[in-house]
Image (cartoon, rainbow, N blue to C red):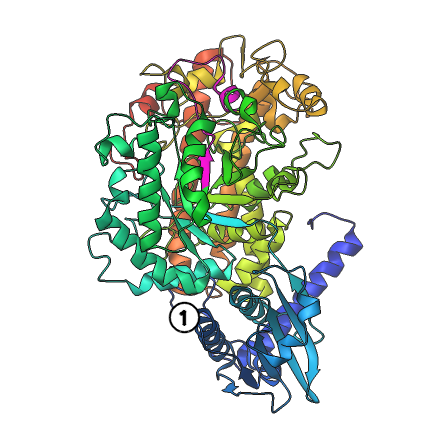
Amino acid sequence: MTTTEGPPRAAGWRWSAALAAALLWLAGVVLAAPVAHAEDGYALWLRYRPLPQAQAEEYRAAATELVAPAATPTQRVTRAELLRGLEGLLGAAPVSSAAVSRDGALVVGTPASSKVVAGLRRELAGLGREGYLIRSLRVDGRQATVIAANEDVGVLYGAFHYLRLLQTGRPLRGLDLREAPRVQLRVLNHWDNLDGTVERGYAGASIWDWHKLPDWRDPRYTDYARANASIGINGTVLNNVNSNALVLTPMYLEKVAALAEVFRPYGIRVYLSARFSAPREIGGLPTADPLDPAVRRWWKEKVDEIYRHVPDFGGFLVKANSEGQPGPQDYGRSHADGANMLAEALAPHGGVVMWRAFVYSDEEPEDRAKQAYNEFVPLDGRFAGNVLVQVKNGAIDFQPREPFHPLFGAMPRTPLMMEFQITKEYLGFATHLVYLGPLFEETLRADTHVRGEGSTVAKVVDGSLHGYRLTGMAGVANIGADRNWSGSHFDQANWYAFGRLAWDPEASARDIAEEWARMTFAPDPRVTGPVVEMMMASREAVVDYMTPLGLHHLMGRGHHYGPGPWVEGGPRADWTSVYFHRATRQGIGFDRSTRGSDAVSQYAPPVARLFDDPATTPETLLLWFHHLPWDYRMASGRTLWEELVARYDRGVAQVRRMRATWARLEGLVDAERHAQVAAFLAIQEKEAQWWRDASIAYWQSINGLPLPPGHAPPPRPLEYYKSLEFPHAPGHH
């Protein structure tokens, strides 16, 4: 990872390099079309805007003609995407040819569709059906670039990679790129309901217009598929994990089939969230017991029916026995019993079950963070071969920061599928600029130590640590009917980052941010440099002003909007803030050490020892694992209380810096997008201050401590902050 720190000479070199790059860009812009015209964000990172003239001329010489098959649907969309991208970026599309006839030819295909690619069969070995090569070579004495793969979908991914090289200003000479995904199932989970609402959706209504399907297939569905294919996503779960059994009825299966037809050329399979009680609700059976022969028969017949509508149906996502959802435990059965029943029905068709591990019992647990581990580890090795257990990145619920889930590394005989949340349920919704790449990266690079040092979560997820035959990564989508897809322009980056990390879980969040910024705005270092720095600092800022030092679950009740550290009462203790922070006049934090709930012992011994001692626990997770006195001495020399206040103020200050940075980009970014981001940053600053003030006011009401010198008191009394209500906050259904 790069850093802005370093000796003066190095810093000076970087500034010189940046200045030279900026001057080079300006030289090109003078001769190119204006860069800052209005855009609404619909094009995402596939804008294909004209490149500076000098660069366009160089690239045109390397793409003089396109030799591409068009016999299959995927071949046709690949060819169309290349022509669309090259025309947009270079000002003119290359001529289409049946064979290489000039220098600068671009040849795409598989061994079955291209004689040129057939000669690369050996080089394609080991790349699977989705991998690809991009290589500079000579064909019939002509200089050419070849995009080659074993199957059409790999060629499509390679075509998007090639266009990405142009969009980001990379050289095209001497190319020798070899890519294949490290994770098999790279899936978006839509929490979209059949009535058009989206649970935890902050970008408007659902993009699926179930009422008009199957007859009207909105062109937006195709653009959705294009965007996902461009970052390697190959599956989508269409409906909410809090599912409605009606989606399995014939009327809705016709609609699902229509979407599957749109997505199929782009290599995207559809999946459905299955309601476990469907045999009772739509099947007329008196039970949904997974061991009941009639129930098993019903699911087999239902699955056969689905595959008649959707021959390449991916399978089911299931939320069971969690938050009131029905499941096998209702009948005294295990999660494995429930998952295996569905797996049995899907197996003849090649379908999979993604069984969520986000569970907690109806009874108040000793520590909710422990429950998934306690329920699933005893079932390791008991799941069918086409079942993945889908595990959230942390043990509570998509908080701004959590330690990695202790299940990772603890189930070597059961494929574990990562579940990230792209939509920012706990990180300020769509209006807060929070790039989630660092959060994803932090989790994936965490070391489980279950097989010694280097046993990272990424190696669990990609199957290399335990030899999983089936691997997957899921992201809870942030996509809605808003014109810019994600509610805000910067939230597009989180969708993008998820796709790129699902393809390669060891990719760099900073590199991904730079790539996205170049494609989304312009490969202008005057823009990308400041934008990337904003993005990379943004997640830590939100942790600081919302949940510093390992605090968690401090948001408003139900809608999860704004601060609510005072939340208590209600149907469950573990739905309250006071359950998690446990603040008293003496101290604060949840004791998960061996002296408390002993959640630390769910980790491998080296990790458990690290987390068990406050002195070795990273300060970013200190109050997650320990209940400590307010005067506990921190590494900075400050007391815990002083450090907590300083972190709140640091978070607010970072948002102010982001606003100032963005303001300086006016004129370099198109006016429409610049104005919306500026407005949202103003909202973020206001709400960061609100989080800071409300939290400090509450903590002071508990500990009775004065503010450290130099820190302003909250401008309003605690009762004001507690009185605020938001009955119609978005995304809560």
Residue 710 in view in this figure: no
Picture coordinates of residue 379 (x, y %)?
54, 25
Quadrant of res 23: bottom right
Say above or below: 183 vs 420.
below
Is residue 290 in the magenta section?
A: no
Magenta residues span: 353-372
Q: Quadrant of residue 431?
A: top left
Location of residue 385 with respect to 489 vertically, above or below: above
Picture layout, residue 275 above or below residue 136: above
> Where is residue 152 drawn, in percent x and y?
52, 68
Location of the C terminus by quadrant is: top left
Q: Label 1: which residue?
A: 37
Report whether 14 appears left or right of 577. Answer: right
Report the amino acid beneath label 1.
His
Disc tally is 1
Considering depth in this image, is 77 or 701 the residue closer to the camera?
Answer: 77
Q: Give the residue drawn at x 38%, y 43%.
A: 683
Left or right placement of residue 135 versus residue 592 in this view = right
Residue 68 in sight in this render: yes
Relative vertical location of residue 684 with respect to residue 60 in this rendering, above or below: above
Question: Which of 718/562 is in front?
Answer: 562
How crowded pointer 1 is (Cα within 10 Å; few <14, some 14-19, many 20+) is rated as few
In what element is the residue under mark 1?
loop
- x%, y% of residue 391? 51, 34
370 magenta-colored: yes
Relative placement, left or right, of 667 versus 639 is left
Q: Residue at x 70, y 68 (%)?
A: 122
Residue 636, x across and y down, in percent: 68, 26
Asked whether 572 or 584 is in front, the reply is 572
Q: Nearer the viewer, residue 656 or 620?
A: 620
